[in-house]
Image (tube, rainbow, N blue to C red):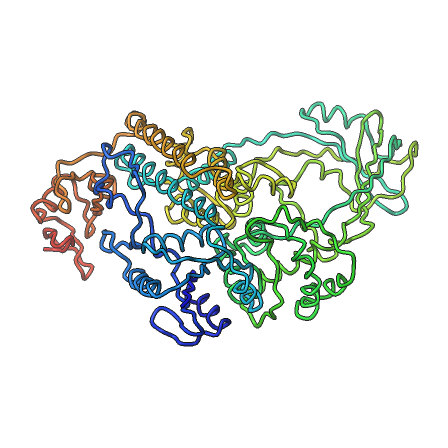
Amino acid sequence: MKVVIAEKPSVARDLARVMGAKEVKDGYIAGNGYAFTYAFGHLVQLCTPQAYGYHNWAVSNLPIIPERFALEVKKVKRDGKQSDDMGALKQLNTIKALLQEAEEIIVATDAGREGELIFRNIYYYLNSNVPFKRLWISSQTDKAIKEGFANLKEGVEYDSLYMSARSRSESDWLIGINATQALTLAAGNKGLLSLGRVQTPTLAMICSRYLENKDFKPTAFYKIQAGFEKDGINFKATSAKIDQKDAAEETIAKLQVGMDAQVKQVEAKETKEQPPLLFDLTSLQQDANKKFGYSADQTLGIAQTLYEKKVITYPRTGSRYIGEDVFEKIEELFQHLADTAPESIAVISKNLIGAKLNKRSVDDKKVTDHHALLVTDEKPGPMPMDQQNIYNMIAKRMVESFSEVCLKDITTVTIDAAGVELIAKGTVIRQYGWRLSADQVEQPDEDTKNDDQDNENAQLPKLTQEEMLQVQTLELAERFTKAKPIHTEASLLKAMETSGKEIEDEEMRQAMKDCGLGTPATRAATIETLFQRDYIKRDKKKLIPTEKGLSVYMLVKDRSIAKVTLTGKWEQKLEEMRANKVSYDVFMKHIKDYTAKITKELLQLRVAIAQEELKPLQKGKIKCPKCGPGQIMLYDKVAQCDHYARGCDFKIWRTLNGVFLDEKEMKNLLEKGKTSVLNNVRGLDGKTVSAPLLFENFKVNVG
């Protein structure tokens, strides 16, 4: 029997159907010589520090660097304690029983770094030695599945992919566990302060941009704008930037409406605007955020659903190119779109059939594990609006990417008015090419508007050198310098892709992708983690750091853990490991050395924090009723155990039933279980009485 291990039940069911297995069992589907079983994502994880004997958070434990990492069943938190996920344990036992009867394993987890790790962790945790092969496909169509099973790859071909995934997982564990504990302990009573290898530099990019924007002081500058007319066409010409208002007023005083101005130079330049590259996951997420306001995580979820519906190819791709083999079949997809897509896409798809296609997105060398996102030849049925939107975006990008270039004539006219140089620009599109299917060009946001756009005209008349024009209008325009806009998910994803470097050129950004923050598959999860930690929040499309997020940033902004370029270099090394250019041992030695260094750095912050911090309100001599050794810290609104970092989560409001408790009454309540008789205590019926408050089973009642 061959055991096929998929990443989730729905995929296993689909594979089983295609391969003729119909007998549904508990945890798998059998038939035709196969057993199709599945994980639910990660069934097995790296052991928690407790498994290595570190049960409490203490400075003396750090850094925690296991000599050898061990694996355990996925854990869930119940009543403040970690325990085995019973669903994961049951499924692991099912897989274990199947492997005992297996002659061969077929790995059918997602064809990428994370999918490989999910399978290998199960395989090594169960101590299996059954030989395995790899199903490596880029779409879930019946045809692709059958071809994949007919052309299984040797499992060893993906050893370097696994080592890269393993290194990423272990380095995230080392840096995340140690940095989080070190900063939390250093900061004392600020609560849990989570740090991470990718999470922290991402937070740093959000916070630094936010503070830069908030602290920005606009500076005024001036431009002279003159209006002209010829052959019934009105256009404007603009001066260079003038910094001082008095200089600008002095300059415009030389000019007057009705005066003559001379055309000094007319320069016409033909430019070719290449079509955009096909989508990878990150660029799809960026555009979906701009166009529909979808979060990166939403877009990934929608794309994953479309993939499982078989209507698009593998979504977690980092490539914006396809190979020659896929290009050979692209006309079939255009025929499919001509028959099934919305009219705006269908018409252009039809025109591309038999035409000479633009091959900018075709490059075998730039295809990594998976090619760029495409639609498949499966007919999409009725879909919710969000799925239609993402599907149509991918289809539309396909017709754009293989269309002709857009040809433009850009004309720049220099005009001399009484010695003042004015510039007018105009663009004429001679061949729309791919822009025929593109959306109407959006007006630039005020935040991103370029000064040069003051010179832009929709249309210019035919002008010749030495020609005289009459000034029709004059204006002294006041402009202000603008701060870089606060990050949206679209701009953050773009910054993560290039480690914060501002690169507009698509191909240059592609060249940078191996040293970005995270991977296309993990960036959405990183952003979601920052929301879950209460480090950032949304204001419409803007990403705003919370007070907690800014506090963490201010603590670590000068530390290496917040440096974008360092994390980018690690990502590059992980990609090189996948390509067998860097060894696991060399990379992990560097990470372990770094872990020890950053842990020491963060623990040393204790002195700085103590000096900088406003006086903590007070530490009452009140014994914690939950953990015993801890003492209760009194804040404005809450009282909290000072052993938070060691696992005690006791916290209680200082105002209870309408009465604020001072230190004496809080001590009575928590140590004696009862306050003195208090006035104006609000009862269950809303009426106030004079009565003590009782503390029983961690609940407060009126006595």
Locate residue 681 relative to residue 269 in the image: left or right: left
Where is residue 661 shown, x and y percent of the image? 17, 44
- 431 or 23, which is in the foreground? 23
- 493 or 148, which is in the foreground? 148
Locate residue 430 relative to residue 622 in the image: left or right: right
- 365 or 354, which is in the foreground? 365
Q: In the image as oriented, which residue stretches furthest toward the bottom?
A: 23
What residue is rendered at 52% in x and 53% in y?
316
Where is residue 108 shown, x and y percent of the image? 46, 60
What residue is rendered at 10% in x and 47% in y?
675
- 112 or 40, which is in the foreground? 112
What residue is rendered at 60% in x and 43% in y?
510
Where is residue 211 shown, x and y percent of the image? 48, 35
Residue 13 to residue 231: above or below: below
Number of residue marks: 0
Q: Quadrant of residue 50?
A: top left
Whether residue 160 is visible to the viewer of this picture, yes or no, is yes
Whether residue 386 is visible to the viewer of this picture, yes or no, is no
Where is residue 243 shown, x and y percent of the image? 67, 25
Quadrant (top left/top right/bottom left/bottom right) for the C terminus? bottom left
Locate residue 283 relative to residue 527 in the image: left or right: right
Quadrant (top left/top right/bottom left/bottom right) for the N terminus? bottom left
Q: Quadrant of residue 447?
A: top right
